[in-house]
C-alpha cells in the first residue's frame, strides 16, 4: 500500500488528510505540535479575548475516525527528495511514496535591524501566549508606578489584517483594564499606535475599506501613522526611517511572513518571493511529481498558466491542500493530474467591536456591523471542533454584552516568545 506523508497540521495539511481519508493509502500526518491552530483568531488570544484552548484542537482528535491516518508528533529536519525519505528530530527516518508539504510560513522581519530580537510576532500559539503575558505585565507595571516616567505606548508594526485587528483589540483591552479592572492607566499617556510604510491600511482590500479601517481605528483612540517605515527595533521602542524615535512598552510585529527558515524554505528546489516554493500547475515540484507543496509555503498559482500568485490566506491553504490530496489519488489511479485554480471567496478583517470589513469577489463590500456579523459567522464555521465553536460564540456574546469577560491572565508557562 502506498505511503503518503503530510507535513503540517495547518489548514492545508488537514484538508489534504481529509481527501485521503478512507482511500487505500497509509497516511502519516507529522507536526512538531500536537494540535491544529486556528490562526485567524490568534490576535484575540494575544489581547486576552479568548483562551489558547479556544483556538487550538488536538491533532489526534481530528483524525481519530480516519482509520488509515496516523499522527506522528515530531519536527521534520530534512527531506531527501531523491531517496523519498524524511528525517525527524529524534533521528527516525520515514519513507514515502507521496509527500505533501504544508509547513506554512513564519514571521518575516525583512532585514529590519533588531526586529527579530526585540519585536514580538503573532504567528503561533506560543507567540500569542507570550504577547498576552507581556502586554498584561507591562500594564500592571504602569499601574504599580503610575507617576513614573517612561514609554507608555503599545506599538503595532504592520497595516495588514493582523495589524489592524491587533490594534483594535488592544484599544478594547485598555478600556476593559481601566473601566473594570480599575488599573491606573492614564489614557492621555497610554496609547496604541499602528505604524506602516504603505500609504494606506489593508493593501489588497478595496481602497474604501482601507480608509474605513483607518477612520474607525482613529475614532477609537488608535494613533495611525502611514507612510512611516521602521528602520530599527530596540528593547524599548523603534527608530523610524527618518530618524524619529518612538518609545514603546511593547512592539508587536505584524509586518508580514516569509517561508525562509522553514522546512519548505530549505528544500533544494526553486523558490520565489519570500522563499515560497515554486510549484507546477498541479502544485507538484518540477522533477518530483510525487511531492506537492501547499498553503503559505508555496507560490500557489491563481490560475493555470498565469503568472499571478495567490495570497497567503487560509482559503488558499484550504483549497490547495484539498487539491493536493486529490492529485495523489489521481496519480495512484494512473490518471493525469489537474491544474489548480484558486476560487476567490473574498477577504475579511475586523477592526473591533461591531466594526469589520468584508470584500467579496463580486465587488460587494461590507463594513461596520454587517461586515462584523459576516466575519463572526465565517470564523465560527471554519473553527474546528463543536466545543470550540460553542465556547468562542459564548465568549463573543459575553464580551459584546458585558466587557469584563476575557482571560486577562499572566501565565508564567505560556512560552518563551522571541
Image (cartoon, helix red, strand yellow):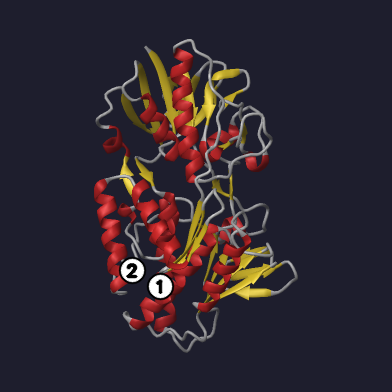
Q: Is residue 310 visible?
A: yes
Residue 408, labelled with which disc? 2
The x and y percentages for residue 171 are 46, 74
Mark 1 near mark 2, Cβ–Cβ under 8 Å?
yes
Measure how far apart labels 1 and 2 are at the Cα level: 9 Å
Residue nearer the viewer, 289 or 216: 216
Residue 401 as seen in the image, left or right of residue 112:
left
Residue drawn 41% across the image and 64% down it: 132
Residue drawn 26% across the image and 38% down it: 61
The x and y percentages for residue 134 are 44, 66
Q: Residues within 10 Å of mark 2 (few under 14, many from 20)?
A: many
Residue drawn 26% across the image and 61% down it: 394
Residue with the mark numbered 1: 173
- In terms of secondary structure, where does tag 1 sit? helix
- In terms of secondary structure, where does tag 2 sit? loop
* Relative height, residue 172 to residue 22 (above, below): below
In the figure, residue 158 lies in which quadrant? Answer: bottom right
1 or 2: mark nearer the eye? 1
Residue nearer the viewer, 111 or 413: 111
Residue drawn 61% across the image and 33% down it: 303
The x and y percentages for residue 219 are 52, 78
Q: Return the disc, 1 or 2, that comes first in the chain's sequence.
A: 1
Q: Is residue 416 visible?
A: no
The x and y percentages for residue 90 are 41, 30
Query: Which quadrant is home to the N terminus?
Result: top left
Residue 231 as seen in the image, left or right of residue 20:
right
* Relative height, residue 73 to residue 387 (above, below): above
Question: In the displayed image of the protein, which residue is found farthest to the bottom?
Answer: 147
Amino acid at each position: 500500500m502506498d505511503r503518503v506523508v503530510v507535513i503540517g497540521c495547518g489548514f492545508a495539511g488537514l484538508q489534504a488528510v481529509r481527501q485521503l481519508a478512507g482511500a487505500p493509502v497509509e497516511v502519516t500526518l507529522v507536526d512538531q505540535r500536537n494540535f491544529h491552530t486556528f490562526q485567524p483568531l490568534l490576535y484575540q488570544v494575544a489581547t486576552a479575548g479568548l483562551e489558547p484552548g479556544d483556538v487550538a484542537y488536538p491533532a489526534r482528535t481530528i483524525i481519530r475516525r480516519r482509520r488509515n491516518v496516523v499522527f506522528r508528533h515530531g519536527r521534520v529536519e530534512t527531506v531527501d527528495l531523491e531517496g523519498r525519505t524524511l528525517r525527524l528530530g529524534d533521528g527516525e527516518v520515514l519513507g514515502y511514496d507521496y509527500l505533501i508539504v504544508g509547513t506554512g510560513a513564519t514571521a518575516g522581519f525583512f532585514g529590519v535591524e533588531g526586529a527579530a530580537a526585540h519585536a514580538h510576532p503573532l504567528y503561533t500559539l506560543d507567540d500569542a501566549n507570550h504577547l498576552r503575558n507581556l502586554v498584561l505585565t507591562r500594564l500592571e507595571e504602569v499601574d504599580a508606578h503610575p507617576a513614573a516616567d517612561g514609554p507608555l505606548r503599545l506599538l503595532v508594526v504592520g497595516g495588514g489584517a493582523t495589524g489592524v485587528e491587533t490594534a483594535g483589540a488592544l484599544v478594547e483591552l485598555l478600556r476593559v483594564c481601566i473601566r473594570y479592572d480599575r488599573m491606573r492607566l492614564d489614557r492621555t499617556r497610554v496609547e496604541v499606535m499602528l505604524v506602516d510604510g504603505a500609504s494606506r491600511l489593508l493593501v489588497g482590500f478595496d481602497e474604501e475599506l482601507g480608509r474605513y479601517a483607518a477612520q474607525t481605528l482613529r475614532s477609537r483612540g488608535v494613533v495611525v501613522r502611514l507612510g512611516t517605515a521602521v528602520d530599527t527595533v530596540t528593547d524599548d521602542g523603534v527608530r523610524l526611517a527618518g530618524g524619529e524615535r518612538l518609545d514603546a512598552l511593547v512592539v508587536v510585529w505584524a509586518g508580514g511572513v516569509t517561508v525562509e527558515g522553514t522546512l519548505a524554505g530549505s528544500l533544494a528546489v526553486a523558490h520565489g518571493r519570500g522563499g515560497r516554493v515554486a510549484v507546477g500547475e498541479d502544485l507538484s515540484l518540477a522533477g518530483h511529481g510525487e511531492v506537492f507543496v501547499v498553503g503559505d509555503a508555496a507560490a500557489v498559482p491563481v490560475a493555470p498558466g498565469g503568472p499571478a500568485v495567490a495570497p497567503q490566506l487560509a482559503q488558499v491553504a484550504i483549497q490547495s491542500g484539498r487539491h493536493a490530496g486529490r492529485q495523489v489519488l489521481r496519480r495512484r489511479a494512473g490518471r493525469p493530474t489537474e491544474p489548480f485554480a484558486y476560487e476567490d471567496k473574498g477577504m475579511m478583517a475586523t477592526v473591533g467591536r461591531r466594526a469589520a470589513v468584508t470584500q467579496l469577489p463580486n465587488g460587494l463590500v461590507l463594513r461596520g456591523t454587517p461586515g462584523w456579523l459576516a466575519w463572526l459567522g465565517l470564523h465560527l464555521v471554519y473553527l474546528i471542533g463543536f466545543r470550540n465553536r460553542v465556547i468562542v460564540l459564548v465568549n463573543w456574546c459575553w464580551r459584546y454584552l458585558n466587557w469584563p469577560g476575557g482571560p486577562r491572565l499572566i501565565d508564567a508557562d505560556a512560552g518563551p516568545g522571541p
